[in-house]
Structure formats: structure tokens, C-alpha cells
Amino acid sequence: MSLPALVIYGLGLALALGYRSWAQWRATGSTGFVGIREPVLSLGWWGGMLFVLSIALTVAAPVLELAGITPATLEPMAVGLVFAVAGLILTLAAQHAMGASWRVGVDADERTDLVTTGVFGLVRNPIFTAMVVALAGLPLLVPTWVSVAALLSLVAAVEIQVRVVEEPYLARVHGAAFTAYTARTGRFVPKL
């Protein structure tokens, strides 16, 4: 399952980062890539670095398997394909729902609209939720400790990014509107 995993996650990265950046640039004149702006070694910086690590490990797991380098292998499950494809589709749909407010990273000097409708009316971070669903398929498709490390790295990155960087920024910029939004929507799962 390494080749299908490499194709699915490669396509996912190309669409979620490449195509989405191009579409954002066409619509707004900016790619939306802000990058890591947190002080080096701060918790927010580590969140960004864990995203980078997660992407690297996501590619490394199937590449290592295809190259015949198989770190300690876990029991495989084909259901990972469903997670990978469903998560990719949900990620792209949630990115699209953000419209011009979509960004990678936070620029403290920039103010975007607070998106609270559609899937964002159910959860505050549907893109991150969908990314975790997609990457949950990797250890099932490529059952190695590298793929598990990719998933754990992403979960840690998402938790740090949302709690330390993004939500504090949104609270500062949108004040009472964001507070009301958090009271009625779950962070990653509806009602939680």
C-alpha cells in the first residue's frame, strides 16, 4: 500500500498547499502563506516545526517502505485508504469554505474575516480535523513507526497551533464575536 499512500498524500499536499495557494493568489493577490512568525523555540514555533516534521514524515513513510527500508512494522489495515481519501476531500472542502480568509500561519498585523458559517458553524478548526483524519490513514496504509510519528507530530502541531497561536490571535482581533463563536462550536469536533 506504500505506492497508493505516496500518491494520495502527494496529491493531497499538491492540492492542499500548491493548488490552494495558487487559488488564493488568484483571488486575493496573496498566496496566504505567512509561515512561522513565532519566536524561535517558543511553543508556537514548535507547533510550526511539528507541522513541517509531520509533512516530512508523511512523505518518508511510504518512500522508505518502497525503498525496502522498513522500520519496525505494525499490522496493516486497508481501511486507511478510506481515512486518507475522506480526510483529503474534507480538508479541501474546508479550505474552500474559508474563502479569502484562508492562511497558513498567522500574521499579527493582518485582519481577516471570522468565518463561522458552513462547516465552520460546526467546528472552529475543520481543516485541522480533516488533516488529522487524512493522516490517520497513513499508519494503516504504511504500518511503520515513521507513519505513526507523522500522525503524532501532526496532532501535537495542531494542538499547539490552535491553542497557542491561532485562537489567541482570533480572540484579540475579533473579541466578543470570537468568544460567542467558541461558546457555540467545538474546537475540533462538534459540541466538544
Image (cartoon, rainbow, N blue to C red):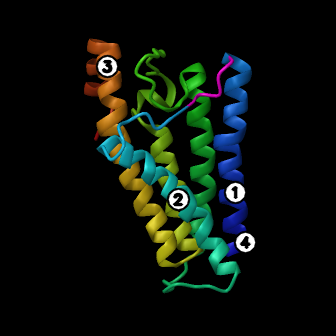
Please state which amino acid type lies under the numbered disc 4: Leu
Please state which amino acid type lies under the numbered disc 1: Gly
Report how far apart the C-alphas of labels 2 and 1 lie in the structure.
12 Å
Tag 4 residue:
3
- Counting residues from the N terminus, which is met first, the one under dot 2 or under dot 4? 4
Tag 2 residue:
135
Residue 128 in view in this figure: yes
Residue 83 in view in this figure: no
Tag 3 residue:
178
- Quarter placement of the N terminus: bottom right
Whether pointer 3 and pointer 2 mark residues with C-beta atoms closer than 8 Å, the reply is no
Q: Residues within 10 Å of mark 3 (few under 14, many from 20)?
A: some
Please tell me which residue is depicted at 44% across the width and 45% down the height of the picture.
48
Is residue 61 or residue 177 the one in the foreground? 61
- Counting residues from the N terminus, which is met first, the one under dot 3 or under dot 2? 2
- Counting residues from the N terminus, which is met first, the one under dot 1 or under dot 4? 4
Which quadrant of the figure has residue 169? top left
- Counting residues from the N terminus, which is met first, the one under dot 3 or under dot 4? 4
Please tell me which residue is depicted at 31% across the width and 19% down the height of the picture.
178
